[in-house]
Structure formats: structure tokens, C-alpha cells
Image: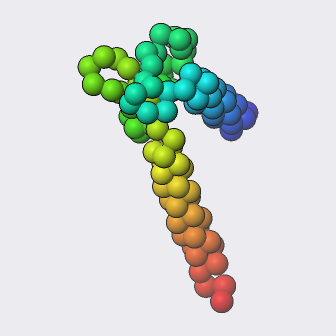
Amino acid sequence: MILSNIKNVLIKNYAKKRAIIQKFKNLGAFNVDLAIKLDDFQKEDFPIINNMKRTEVIVKVGYNDLYYFDEKKLLENRLKKTKWAMILLLIIIIFLFKGKF
């Protein structure tokens, strides 16, 4: 039951994140020159937006409260997460098969 709830929350957050990214893409906010205000986003989007700002996927431009989506940074973050997942998986495999050979 608890794992099911966690799974549902993770899926919901992933879907919200994808929707936020798509909205930035639809508005054309890809670089400093095309930055937008966050007025178009709903109140419940802001926890995810704040997380994306923390990981520098959404970047603030100066003091104007304008933001843009940095796809390169998103890909770097995904690669970093994938590397850590692979390292963790390798450690688990080594631990499980230790002494079997």
C-alpha cells in the first residue's frame, strides 16, 4: 500500500514536471533572450518549479523575474542520476554475489 502511494506520487510529479517543461517549450523560453515570467503557471506547479530552479533546469535571468528552460542542464542532471543509479546497482550486484564465485 505504501509503495503504491509512493509510486503514484512519483508518477504524478514526473507528469507535472513534463508538463512544465512542455509549457516552457511551447512558450519558446529556451534562452536568456526568450525568458518568460512564471505568471502562466498554476500555484501547485511551484514546488516542482522551485526544485527545477534549484537544479538549474529553470534559470532566472537577472532581477526581472524572468526564467528560461535549460535543456542542456536537464540532460546533464539525467545523466548524473543515471550514473549514480548504475553505480548503486553495481554495488548491489557485487554485494549479492559476493562469495558465490
Residue closest to the far left: 63
* Residue 85: quadrant of the picture: bottom right
In the rendered image of this protein, does residue 15 appear above or below residue 55?
Answer: above
Q: Is residue 69 left or right of residue 20?
A: left
Rendered residue at 50%/59% (across/down): 84
Position of residue 47 measured from the top left corner of the image (x, y, whole percent) = 48, 22
Measured as percent of width and height from the top left, residue 12 is found at 66, 28
Quarter holding the N terminus is: top right
State the colouring used for the structure image: rainbow
Between 15 and 93, the residue placed more toward the observer is: 15
The answer to whether any part of residue 49 appears in the image is yes
Which is nearer the eye, 94 or 16?
16
Which quadrant of the rendered structure holds the C terminus?
Answer: bottom right
Is residue 5 visible in the rendered image? The answer is no
Outermost residue toward the bottom in this view: 101
Percent across and percent down for residue 83 are 52, 61
Looking at this view, is 6 or 46 the one in front? 46
The residue drawn where x is 34% and y is 17% is 65
* Picture quadrant where residue 35 is located: top left
Q: Position of residue 36 (x, y in %)?
A: 45, 19
Against 55, is 95 above or below? below
